[in-house]
Amino acid sequence: RPPPAPGARAPPPAGSGHRLRTGFERLAASGYASLRGGRVGVVTNPTGVTRDVRHIVDVMHADDRVDLTAVFGPEHGFRGTAQAGGSEGRYDDPATGLPVYDTYLKSGQPLADVFTASGVDTVVFDIQDAGARFYTYIWTLYDCMEAARLAGKRFVVLDRPNPVTGRAALGPVLHKEFATFVGRQPIAQAHGMTVAELARLFNGEFLTRPVELDTVLMSGWRRSDFYDASGLPWVPPSPNMPTADSALVYSGTCLFEGTNLSEGRGTTRPFELLGAEGVDGRWAAAANGLGLPGVYFREAYFAPTFSKFEGKTVGGVQIHVHDRAAYDPVRTGIALLVTARKVWSGFAWRSDNWIDKLTGSTQVRTMIDAGADTDEVVAAWQDELGAFRRTRKEYLLYR
């Protein structure tokens, strides 16, 4: 295990009887020692809660030991009232009276100007991630770190678990020319890191110049732990991530956003239900025939209440993960794309080639179009993934 980096508050070693404590829990237990003497602003959303589901903003606002003066809301908003692609705008929080500033779709100097206008000295980040490159909160983290550097602010990351473990990085690595808000920098599709580890990676590899960074780590978390081992409540980090099961499959099946099939938005099982009009049981049969580890596919029919195929009954599959340790979400996502294209003549990519933004290059799309099978597609990214894994290893903070 590497020694903690400067600015990283090392956790005690995890033991069989040691309960997980989040970065916020450890910060509060210290009496907010690292935040004393300055005005504090928090980048957070509904996932920034304590074990007894009080929001950390409400907790900190009521504590005289910390001078909390602002909140910064990302996509979906600080209190979570906005759907995908939306935010809450600038307002005063009714519960605390604190000014809430909108960070969504802001980066660079415009975001730095927001931090400057807020008057804070330290920007704190506490948001639950879902473990996938295209889950935008890690790029909110990146953008806020860069903006804090430009504004001359200190940056503190309060760590939370990667809900799908931190065992390994999986999937293709983003090519820089495909950088968007669903992938700013070349990391793997399933990065296998916590937000504090990602912050260290961003600071060491990608920011123009490093920001003054402090990371408050968890204690009692192991890289092999799934979210249910944490004992923490699951608060949906966004409207279509209702459970930790959603996060388990998301890094693979979110690829269906880049197709004309439903990725399950508008159902009770987003990213676990996939389908389209005209799809039948042949898809589940083809996917099951691959013998993918840890997962079964059930022929399923559903009617999304919004998004693709709103109000229409469509056919497809439901993913049933029966062995989480063996399951590879990215390989599974690729296999489902390959088999959907083979069994359904209506299969098509989105006309804007959004799949390239999600996978990070043209490679997946062009290989599948050329008839490549799952193993061939997965093999094509192994060299780049290996290089990322070597870089990633330098920034890991937990066993």
Image (cartoon, rainbow, N blue to C red):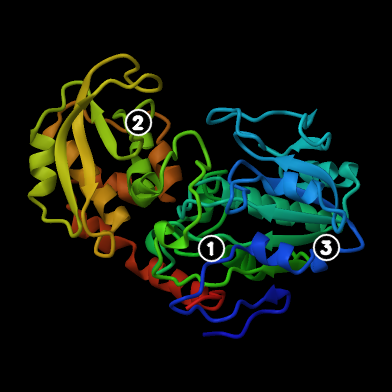
Residue sitting at x 65%, y 35%: 79
Q: Position of residue 207 (x, y in %)?
A: 69, 62
SS for tag 1?
loop
Can residue 86 be seen by looking at this rendering?
A: yes
Front disc: 1 or 2: 2
- Label 3: which residue? 35
- Label 1: which residue? 194
Residue sitting at x 71%, y 51%: 144
Residue sitting at x 80%, y 68%: 34
Q: Is tag 3's residue or tag 2's residue first in the polypeptide sequence?
A: 3
Q: Position of residue 122 (x, y in %)?
A: 83, 57
Q: Is tag 3's residue or tag 1's residue first in the polypeptide sequence?
A: 3
Question: Spatial distance from mark 3 to mark 2, Cα to Cα?
Answer: 40 Å
**12 sits to left or right of 66:** left
Can residue 342 be seen by looking at this rendering?
A: no
Mark 2: amino acid: Thr
Residue nearest the observer in this picture, 398 or 227: 227
- Label 2: which residue? 268
Q: Is tag 1's residue or tag 2's residue first in the polypeptide sequence?
A: 1
Q: Quadrant of residue 209?
A: bottom right
Mark 1: amino acid: Thr
Mark 3: amino acid: Leu
User: Within 10 angstroms of label 1, few (less than 14), some, or many (20 or more) residues?
Assistant: many
